[in-house]
């Protein structure tokens, strides 16, 4: 299983330009590197402009360009909260322009409220501040500059991931035929011996609008292959698929999405498990700070407005042309207060943590190895058959004879190694900011590469179901990330407890991926302020659920299924008495691809093909 384990980090990566004593001016503005204290002994370094009025030397503003990534978008733009927010932004307001409106449309239709709590480090979630230069971002060499404290909270909003579109035909052909699907491209690891396929054989292909249109039908076919009971077919498309349809309604860009998998004997849980390559949703903004000792009024902003609700390749560098007056009302800023101007919505090919994890030399070495493996395959006689042994993840990976399935493919169906193209894409209205007016005076500046601010959550790594809780005060569901992280397959069935401050008694478990989640038991433990504890059982939502609970099974959730779980409270319980709620869930999950491998192995043992 491919895991990307991240801590919850609030990353500020500054693109720092070395300045000489005589730095170049930009229409009354000087390039400026600001050092912001974010904790004891910790400093974030950010690049921007310091602009001074020619008419009044006491009137000054600082302008920065930033790219908000991960959970940082909701923290800054949607009323969220996080450590260091005050240090970085102080008293701020967000300009209500078309870019912000489109951001909020995406979040309201396809996003979820998120709450992450620092759990003290180790393998648990923790909050941390990372600061670095552009070179450090590009190389992935970022060092932690500050650490959050246990119990600190991030409240934000997260956009749905793009859906894993089922590649049913390709998966079945891989299992059952002696040729690789013609639709798939390939790359190769090292060839283990002359009759074996290379280890870490990668299979991939670009997705098209036809794949999106066939999503529901393919999912029904996949469900029929892995489900051994009458399956409830959910009528509505999942939020992830609705998001994809919305983004591509006005055109599907070339090479926008691709799905890939690897054939690895050592990693059975990734075999034939086609995953869609995800993007990091980011928002570029400008930060205008009043560094005068008196209030100032920004009467106008200048630049260029454009864009549309069509997904398009994003320009790699900011535009510096355009002096049109941008729409908006005058804004008065008190000393040290800031105006945040949304500029562009970007679906980035890599988030800042992942950029540069593989340098050019490493990529060149891997590609040379792939070419060598392909050469050895083609050197075999025509009709030669190569084999790949895979283990059934559902059987616990004991690696015995009964746990192995052999995939055989003829030499002629292998292809030369190739690799997908990755690009950033922009969506919605787009602004380029090039100047502002104060008291009738225009201050102009060039656009600079944006500083980067990122929040990520370690709980989002890997597969498994998603836990939500109901916030009665906000009347919304709060996404708390994944549960049963390590419980892939029945032999790894496990229990996990999630704690919440105060009274929480309504939960939702959602299966958002191509997998089956088996929920065995759930319970809720309430700790009261008088020292008592209460252990509660869930209320049956239907007669069918009551029968399942009696059979020691809460639910089986298939792709896009969800279940709501409510615990009945004692009539005399005062919510103010509850100091902590502990929700415990037991069960496991199986990836659809692993279920197909298990079924294929069963046919072989029964004397089938």
Image (spheres, rainbow, N blue to C red):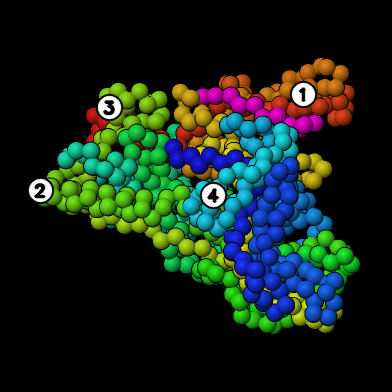
Q: Which mark is residue 381?
A: 2
Residue 176 in view here: no
Distance from the alpha carbon under mark 1 to that under mark 3: 49 Å
Residue at 55%, 58% (x, y): give it. Answer: 134
Residue at 27%, 27% (x, y): give it. Answer: 605
Mark 2 or 3: in front is 2
- Of the two numbered discs 1 and 4 on the same chain, state the one appearing first in sequence: 4
Give the residue number, with chain letter if any, for mark 4: 353
Which is nearer the eye, 32 or 529? 32
Asked if residue 184 lies left or right of residue 94, the reply is: left
Mark 3 or 4: in front is 4
Q: Which mark is residue 526?
A: 1
Q: What span is in magenta?
A: 493-509
| Image label count | 4
- Of the two numbered discs 3 and 4 on the same chain, state the one appearing first in sequence: 4
Mark 1 or 4: in front is 4
Q: Check if mark 1's residue and mark 3's residue have beta carbons within 8 Å.
A: no
Image position, residue 46 (x, y; %):
66, 58
Distance from the alpha carbon under mark 2 to that under mark 4: 45 Å
> Circle 3 — which element?
helix
- Of the two numbered discs 2 and 3 on the same chain, state the one appearing first in sequence: 2
Mark 1 or 3: in front is 1
Which is nearer the eye, 37 or 373? 37
Image position of 183 with respect to 534: above or below: below
């Amino acid at each position: 299983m491919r895991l990307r384990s991240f801590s919850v980090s609030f990353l500020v990566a500054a693109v720092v330009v070395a300045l000489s004593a005589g730095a170049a001016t930009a229409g009354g503005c000087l390039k400026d590197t600001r050092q912001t204290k974010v904790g004891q002994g910790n400093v974030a370094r950010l690049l921007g402009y310091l602009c001074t009025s020619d008419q009044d030397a006491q009137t000054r503003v600082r302008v920065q360009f930033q790219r908000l990534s991960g959970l940082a978008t909701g923290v800054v733009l949607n009323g969220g909260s996080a450590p260091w927010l005050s240090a970085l932004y102080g008293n701020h307001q967000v300009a209500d322009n078309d870019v912000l409106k489109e951001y909020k449309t995406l979040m309201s239709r396809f996003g979820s409220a998120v709450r992450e709590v620092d759990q003290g480090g180790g393998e648990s979630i923790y909050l941390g501040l990372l600061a670095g230069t552009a070179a450090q971002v590009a190389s992935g060499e970022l060092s932690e500059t500050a650490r959050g404290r246990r119990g600190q909270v991030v409240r934000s909003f997260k956009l749905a991931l793009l859906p894993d579109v089922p590649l049913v035909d390709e998966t079945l052909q891989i299992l059952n035929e002696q040729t690789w699907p013609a639709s798939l491209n390939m790359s190769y690891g090292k060839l283990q011996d002359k009759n074996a396929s290379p280890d870490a054989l990668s299979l991939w292909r670009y997705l098209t609008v036809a794949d999106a249109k066939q999503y529901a039908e393919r999912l029904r076919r996949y469900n029929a292959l892995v489900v051994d009971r009458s399956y409830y077919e959910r009528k509505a498309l999942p939020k992830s698929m609705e998001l994809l349809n919305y983004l591509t309604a006005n055109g599907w860009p070339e090479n926008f999405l691709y799905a890939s998998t690897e054939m690895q004997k050592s990693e059975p849980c990734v075999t034939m498990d086609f995953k869609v390559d995800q993007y990091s949703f980011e928002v570029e903004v400008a930060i205008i700070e009043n560094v005068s000792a008196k209030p100032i009024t920004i009467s106008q902003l200048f630049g260029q407005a454009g864009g549309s609700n069509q997904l398009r390749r994003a320009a790699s560098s900011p535009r510096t042309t355009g002096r049109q007056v941008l729409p908006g009302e005058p804004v008065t800023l008190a000393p040290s207060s800031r105006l945040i101007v949304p500029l562009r919505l970007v679906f980035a090919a890599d988030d800042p943590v992942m950029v540069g994890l593989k340098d050019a030399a490493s990529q060149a070495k891997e590609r040379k190895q792939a070419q060598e493996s392909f050469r050895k395959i083609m050197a075999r006689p025509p009709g030669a058959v190569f084999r790949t042994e895979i283990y059934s993840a559902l059987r616990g990976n004991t690696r015995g004879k009964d746990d192995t399935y052999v995939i055989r493919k003829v030499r002629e169906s292998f292809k030369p190694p190739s690799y997908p193209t990755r690009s950033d894409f922009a969506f919605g209205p787009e602004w380029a900011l090039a100047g502002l007016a104060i008291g009738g005076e225009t201050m102009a500046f060039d656009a600079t590469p944006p500083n980067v601010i990122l929040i990520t959550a370690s709980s989002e790594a890997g597969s498994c179901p998603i836990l939500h809780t109901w916030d009665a005060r906000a009347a919304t569901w709060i996404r708390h990330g994944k549960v049963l992280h390590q419980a892939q397959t029945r032999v790894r069935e496990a229990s996990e407890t999630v704690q919440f401050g105060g009274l929480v008694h309504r939960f939702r478990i959602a299966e958002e991926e191509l997998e089956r989640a088996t929920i065995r038991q759930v319970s809720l433990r309430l700790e009261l302020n008088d020292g008592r504890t209460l252990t509660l059982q869930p209320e049956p939502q239907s007669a069918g659920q009551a029968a399942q609970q009696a059979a020691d099974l809460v639910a089986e959730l298939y792709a896009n299924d969800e279940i709501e779980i409510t615990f009945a409270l004692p009539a005399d319980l005062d919510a103010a008495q509850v100091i902590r709620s502990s929700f415990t869930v037991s069960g496991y999950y199986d990836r659809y691809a692993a279920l197909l491998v298990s079924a294929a192995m069963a046919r072989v043992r029964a004397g089938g093909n």
